[in-house]
Image (tube, grey):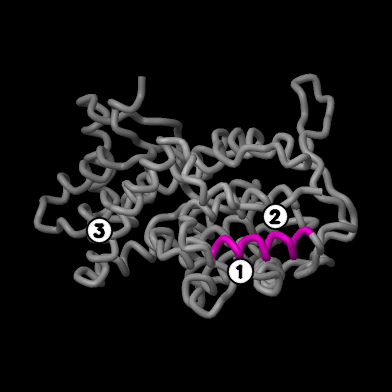
Amino acid sequence: MHIFDYSFLDNGLLPAEIVNLTATISAFNALSQNRQHEYEQVYTELEKIARIQSVKGSNAIEGIVTTDTRIKEIVDKNSAPLNHNEREIAGYRDALDEIHTSHEQMSFNEKTILHLHEKMLHLTDYYNIGKYKTEDNLIMETSPDGRRSVRFAPVPASETKDAMEQLVYAYIEARDNPNVNKLLLTPCVILDFLCIHPFSDGNGRVSRLLTLLLLYKGGFNVTKYVSLEAQINEDKYFYYEALAESSENWQDNKNSYFPFMKNYLSTLYKCYKELDTRFSTVNGKKLKKNERIEMTVLNSVLPITKAEICEILPDVSPTTVEAVLGKMVKNGTARKLGDGRGTKYVNAKYVK
């Protein structure tokens, strides 16, 4: 059985890249904390955008989708869910809202984990919500010729309760160690949670909710203002690649947490970069509207849709946004990706 032990975080032997990323994120976090007190209204606007993108992004990773219009209506509670996918989306909204509003009263323990699972699925007809799996599950992969194979065998159902207890105890021990960086502890705990795979369904979404909770516990609240889930969804190939690499030989205690840790830190770094960009854009209302649209596209870390630009700049009309985007594509400063409602725009220098 896997032994849950995070003492390696206390030995000082961490890759230089991880140490540097951690220092950079901490600096960004300090800057953001200072801004939040001075520019409360700006951060309130950013929070509204991030909430929608988080609900959309985390469910999209699992193939649970609906239209952008319906996502906004459900997240804003202006409409009841109409089908199974929308009930799953509404459930994630409820669990996410609870973390954002009540994280100070929530502890990382089995009770909280089971509660979040139940909260997330309470509108669905799943039979096993808020309970650990009762049958063994496997993480499968399918080859190009259609043949299925086991990529990873999680902890058996009969051992899940004990594994979750050991995970929580290991977290508490590391959390209380002043020499362990809480920012680095989070991806280790989340990797182990995913390798246990304690639920019959919803493990990925619960892992993202727990990531937000642990970030809050560590003093990092960027995910309230920029969606971590949307960032993961945008680069999910690299996320799953890192997860596969770090889970290799996990059962034998020979795995390395560093690939998953690096991906997590890189994603969090992008969140802070995006927050810095969005803060400057929303706060820069003295600029002309076309300049603010251009800033939004050119400074965005990820490709961005017209609808997302309109959310960031609520005082700018969709017609103006569309006109500026067309001009940017024409003069070569931006590249257009895709067609129809899913069309995204990106700084041309980021595209080869």
- Within the magenta stretch, is there residue 239? no
Residue 93: % across, % down: 56, 67
Residue 130: % across, % down: 75, 70
Residue type at numbered disc 2:
Asn
Question: CA separation, marks 2 and 1?
Answer: 16 Å
- Residue sitting nearer the eye, 55 or 290: 55
Using residue 273 as the reference point, say whether residue 11 is left or right of it: right
Q: Nearer the viewer, mark 2 or mark 3?
A: 3
**What residue is at 64 percent from the left and 33 percent from the top?**
245
- Residue sitting nearer the eye, 330 or 1: 1
Residue 21: % across, % down: 38, 42
Which of the 4 image quadrants contains residue 91?
Answer: bottom right
Residue 45: % across, % down: 31, 65
Q: How many marks?
A: 3
Which circle marks residue 215 in the picture? Answer: none
- Within the magenta stretch, is there residue 164? yes
| Pointers 2 and 1 in contact (C-beta within 8 Å) | no
Residue type at numbered disc 1:
Phe
**What residue is at 50 percent from the left and 66 percent from the top?**
73
- In the image, the segment drawn in magenta is 163-175
Mark 3 secondary-structure assignment: helix
Which circle marks residue 203 in the picture? Answer: 2
Question: CA separation, marks 1 and 3?
Answer: 27 Å
- Residue sitting nearer the eye, 346 or 231: 231
Q: Nearer the viewer, mark 2 or mark 1?
A: 1
- Residue sitting nearer the eye, 243 or 180: 180
Which residue is outermost to the bottom?
105
Residue where numbered disc 3 is placed: 31
Residue where numbered disc 1 is placed: 108
| Pointers 2 and 3 in contact (C-beta within 8 Å) | no
Using residue 249 as the reference point, say whether residue 295 is left or right of it: left
